Amino acid sequence: MTVELQDLRKRYDGRVPALDGVSLSVAPGEFMALLGPSGSGKTTLLRAVAGLEFVDSGSIRVFGRDMDGVPARARGVGFVFQSYALFRHMSVAENIGFGLRMRPRARRPARTEIARRVRELLDLMGIGELANRLPEQISGGQRQRVALARALAIEPQLLLLDEPFGALDAQVRKELRLWLRALHDRLGLTSLFVTHDQAEALEMSDRVAVLRAGRIEQVDAPDRLYAEPSSAFVHGFLGESLRFACVVAEGVAHFSDPGLAPMPTNQKPGPAVALIRPHEIQLLPGHGAGHIESVHATGPLHRIGVRLGPRLVELLAPANGLALAPGNPCTLDLSRARLYPEESPR
Amino acid sequence: MNLQPTQEAAGTRAALITLTLLLLGLFLVLPVLVVFSQALSHGVAASWAALGDPDALASIRLTLLVAAISVPLNTVCGVAAAWCISRFRFPGRALLVTLIELPFSVSPVISGLVWVLLFGANGWFGPLLARAGLHIIFAVPGLVLATVFVTLPFVARTLLPLMQAQGALEEEAAVTLGAHGWQVFRHVTLPNIRWGLLYGVLLCNARAMGEFGAAAVVSGHIRGQTNTMPLQIEALFNDYDWVGAFTIAALLSLLALLTLAAKMLLEWRIGLKEAAR
């Protein structure tokens, strides 16, 4: 394994734990996303791997080597900061060559060799014409490429990225996502990347680790994570989710909202919660305790508002010629919902 | 005329500007002019002779010596303190910030008296030091100590907000790229703070050369030995040696003006850099 994290714990003085027993393995060549809401500990985890943060307990192994007591500068890990942290007084080329210039004399390449490598990286990033500009004279997307080139200059096999697209606008973001993933594959890197954007994580990664309050909720490939979320939290965090409270008794879940058919389940008896994506709900028009309140016929699926007692449920359904006029009675089929035990508040 | 809500009428503006210039002229420019005119009142030759006086020369040398010791010392300590405070959270951090500012809020005379209390003939460590043959009060070490104390805040106080605003990210980036402590400081921290640092050093130097109160307490006023320029000026003034007093005063003012000019040059350069952005 490229990265092996064993039961990492970290608590900033007097506050809730930032890392509460995190164990995680990243395979060679893998592109893994650390996904979670702000405060879930994902950045702390990344910084701990880089050696910028110290954990209270647990072990970090990178390429089989125990990182305990190894200073950040000796870890040989590439790190791209959220705000890029480019050296503001150095040109783009000087920024990229920094890691090579700082090497001890014995391992430092010759000046011309450094210049050649910088040139290579500039070309790789497609920013050759920016070599002599200062960071403040280039755009956000260009800065991001410089930051990446600078991290790659020391030839790390492990690349850590902290919200690398956080400061960019949507268009540039999309473009850079594909480009970064392609670069990762081409260079044979192993990448660990922090994001709070689920679309970004699902689109780019081989596997996604979902973090919550300093713990890992689930680690899985994007499709499995989306199709089989292991907890209500993961379900709710990845993609649009609708939540229905229910009570399980004798292998059947009874919904609290009116007019919903009970569904069989193997959950333990007691209060539970059913989560379902808007397009997984089946609309059964014609009769029932609910009625259609609104129909937005835009896009491939219609967004339909259904009133169930005090609650308005917005679902997505294909326009298949059903009688969808507002006011019509209907009911909902939730048989594709996933049931989870009632969450204990964290 | 269309007035913006924050603009005053032309007449009001002119009146305010005139008042400001008048006050500045009266309290700042006029005294400097008087110093120079008094210094040269008996001709250049008399002033030149006053400067050649051994006691005067000794005071100039002493002032330069004291500044040459205390300014580098406070530069190093100031950078270290600003770095610690801006980069780390530790118990007593707020107290340290307050302590650094202490010399600003304490009268220089008290700053001098502290050293007399500690190292004077009847002070805590005085007798011990006297037996060892060390003289601090009424000697050069005392002057250096007093000056260091009074000028302590300048560098640290100038750098602190700057370093806090810049944050530690660039330094962290340098570390992940393999730079060790000194390389990080030399290639990342220092270039980022250089203008602020130079500015703080200039302020520190101006105060080190001009310090009177604290120096007066620890000096002992021995002419040719422990009189710095400000003290020598007072001594000559009390002797009714107008030309002597004002000549050294003129020289000291000149040093101050040079410092100010250097500071303006610096601000102008920084302004140019900002404008280029």
Image: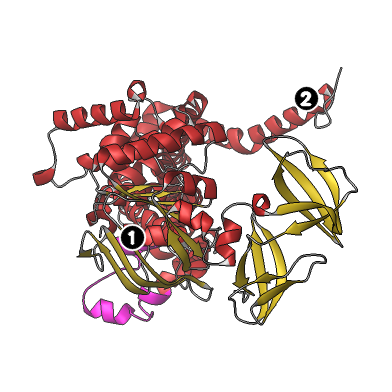
Q: Which of B199 and A148 is in front in this view?
A: A148
Residue A146 vs B177, above or below: the answer is above
Q: Give the range drawn in magenta.
A: B117-146
Task: State the residue position of label 1.
Answer: A49
Please state the horizontal and vertical placement of residue A119, each as a whole percent of the image. 25, 26
Q: Residue at x 84, y 45 (%)?
A: A294
Left or right: B30, with A136 as reference point: right
Residue A48 vs A114, above or below: the answer is below
Task: Check if mark 1's residue and mark 2's residue have beta carbons within 8 Å.
Answer: no
- Which quadrant holds residue B49? top left
Q: Which of A341 and B185 is in front in this view?
A: A341
Q: Is A242 part of what is drawn in magenta?
A: no
Please state the horizontal and vertical placement of residue B72, each as a whole percent of the image. 32, 51
- Regarding residue A197, the answer to whether it shows in the image is no
Q: Which of A47 and B218 is in front in this view?
A: A47
Chain ID at mark 1:
A
Q: Residue at x 63, y 75 (%)?
A: A345
Left or right: A67, with B12 as reference point: left
Q: Is B138 part of what is drawn in magenta?
A: yes
Q: Are marks 1 and 2 on the same chain?
A: no
Q: Which is in the foreground here, disc 1 or disc 2?
A: 1
Chain ID at mark 2:
B
Left or right: A343, with A179 as reference point: right
Residue A142 vs B87, above or below: the answer is above
Question: What's the amino acid at mark 1?
Answer: Val
Please state the horizontal and vertical placement of residue A173, each as a whole percent of the image. 50, 36
